[in-house]
Image (cartoon, helix red, strand yellow):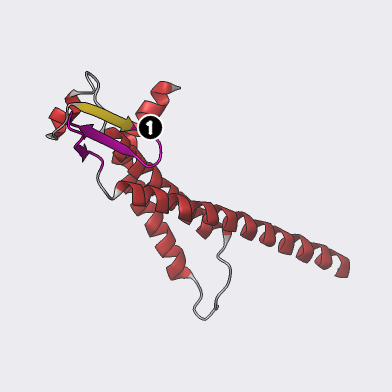
Amino acid sequence: MAVLLLLTLTFAPLVTPFVVVGLALALAKRAWDRELGSGLRLPDAVSCALLAALAGTAALGAYAYGVMQGFYILDPDQMCAAAGARGDVVETRMALPVSVRCVTSAGEGTELVPSWVNPVVHGGLVLCVPAVGTAVLSGVRRRRAQSSGSSTGAISS
């Protein structure tokens, strides 16, 4: 299980851009094919699922990128030297917010994780949760409409 987690964190930053571009193109195609003048309405379940996948993938990729900034196999203290940061001790937190700091004995710290990582992670999670909820709601509404339409059609026949 730990190997799977390590592989996911290692390859997610490499695969994420391709998945995000593919999902964005799929969403753009759905928007292009939408009927003009159909007005405002709840998006369908597929569009919401694509948006949730896009947001979740972006959040996972940014999180993995941030976590891997502070990853060094041999010695944690060599992370600071490898990154060119001043610091004797490494203070690492892999939870949210993602943070890897090199701290000198005087207490001065240098952050190794880029500043864009945490906003992308939080924004992706904030967008993913309502998109999943809307996808479920839209799917339930569609199924109810189909079942009520088919039952009334069967009665009138």
Where residue 8 appears, as percent x and y from the top left, is 38, 32
Query: Does any portion of residue 69 appear in the rendered image?
Result: no
Residue 82 as seen in the image, left or right of residue 95: left
Asked whether, in this view, residue 15 is left or right of residue 33, the answer is left
Position above or below: 117 against 137: above
Residue type pointed to by label 1: Thr
Image-based side of 31 in relation to 10, left or right: right
Q: Nearer the viewer, residue 64 or 44?
A: 64
Give the x, y percent position of residue 123: 41, 54
Foreground of the two, 101 or 150: 101
The residue wearing badge 1 is 8
The secondary structure type at the circle numbered 1 is helix
57 in the magenta segment: no
Residue 38: x and y in percent read 55, 78
Near-viewer residue (83 or 104): 104
Q: Which residues are magenta?
A: 93-113
Residue visible at 21% across and 32% down? 103
Vertical placement of 108 versus 27: above or below? above
Residue at x 36% of width, y 28% of height: 7
